[in-house]
């Protein structure tokens, strides 16, 4: 499969006019082909206002014309960093098919309704997990975490409505640039980058 992708040309004339459409095209190819485990796993990089970066993997839960949505704890390290400095980078590392997509943009909190609607679709155990874990804080032992979970499980048995924690929710990354990278032999890779210009997108080709 990787070989097939490597041999496919990736040229300006085959690109969608809009980068989110182009993303949808690549993402669907991967999802339909079942080629990758968790193709929606992406690396989210944030930085403090002083410019100190940090990265971690999260799952893309939704994308649409406005951008890319993931859910997390707003008081986690990434949540706090994004609150202080909304500039963010996303990276989809689709190594087995020699592709990557790199996004830069701003992360805005999604509306509470959107968060609550998504939270309801999560398995009961994950809903409790969001309450049990003050993400990114130091904890003494795993036993403490499990005890918190058990307490919550007793309070909210399976089938009981679990409210979305107030400190938990979605971020929508609204892109400024999206680069589509397609690997080829001899390091002559294709790199096509959409750059936002007002309501329009300009496409530029980068040297590999
Ligand atoms: C495959 C994978 C998917 C993950 N998905 C999420 C996610 O959707 N949301 C989330 O908050 N953390 C997710 N995590 C955990 C994060 O990588 C990270 O450990 C956590 O969010 C705390 O990050 P922070 O301390 O930098 O804020 C995922 C980890 C992996 C390996």
Image (cartoon, rainbow, N blue to C red):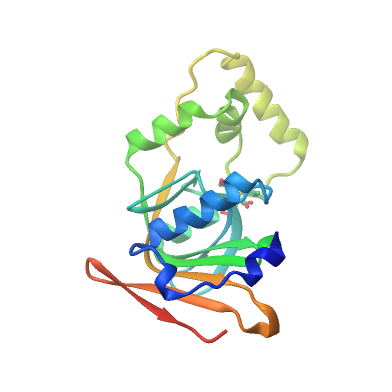
Of residues 198 and 36, the one drawn nearer to the viewer in this rendering: 36
Residue 56: percent from the left, percent from the top? 61, 58
Q: Is residue 198 left or right of residue 150?
A: left
Residue 130: percent from the left, percent from the top? 56, 35
Of residues 148 and 126, the one drawn nearer to the viewer in this rendering: 126
Kindly indicate the quadrant of the structure image that contains residue 169. Answer: top left
Vertical relation: 170 (above or below) 202: above
Residue 15: percent from the left, percent from the top? 41, 67
Q: Quadrant of the C terminus?
A: bottom right
Residue 113: percent from the left, percent from the top? 33, 33
Vertical relation: 131 (above or below) 108: above
Vertical relation: 101 (above or below) 138: below
Of residues 70 and 67, the one drawn nearer to the viewer in this rendering: 67
Residue farthest left in this picture: 199
What residue sits 58% from the left and 23% below the top? Answer: 124
What residue sits 52% from the left and 72% below the top? Answer: 10
What residue sits 60% from the left and 14% below the top? Answer: 158
Of residues 194 and 115, the one drawn nearer to the viewer in this rendering: 194
Q: Quadrant of the N terminus?
A: bottom right
Label count reads 0
Vertical relation: 206 (above or below) 139: below
What residue sits 47% from the left and 75% below the top? Answer: 11
- Answer whether residue 190 is visible to the viewer in this image: yes
- Answer whether residue 85 is visible to the viewer in this image: no
């Amino acid at each position: 499969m990787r070989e097939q992708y490597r041999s496919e040309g990736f040229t300006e004339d085959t690109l969608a006019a809009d980068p989110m459409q182009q993303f949808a095209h690549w993402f669907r190819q991967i999802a339909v082909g079942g080629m990758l485990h968790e193709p929606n796993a992406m690396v989210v990089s944030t930085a403090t206002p002083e410019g100190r970066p940090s990265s971690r993997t999260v799952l893309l839960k939704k994308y649409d014309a406005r951008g890319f949505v993931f859910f997390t704890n707003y008081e986690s390290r990434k949540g706090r960093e994004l609150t202080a400095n909304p500039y963010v980078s996303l990276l989809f590392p689709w190594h087995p098919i020699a592709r990557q997509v790199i996004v830069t943009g701003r992360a805005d909190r999604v509306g509470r309704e959107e968060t609550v609607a998504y939270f309801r679709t999560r398995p009961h155990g994950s809903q409790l997990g969001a309450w049990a874990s003050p993400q990114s804080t130091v904890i003494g032992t795993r036993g403490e975490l499990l005890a918190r979970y058990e307490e919550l499980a007793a309070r909210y048995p399976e089938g009981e409505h679990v409210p979305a924690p107030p400190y938990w929710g979605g971020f929508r990354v609204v892109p400024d640039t999206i680069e589509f990278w397609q690997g080829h032999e001899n390091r002559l890779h294709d790199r096509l980058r959409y750059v936002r210009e007002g309501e329009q997108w300009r496409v530029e080709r980068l040297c590999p």
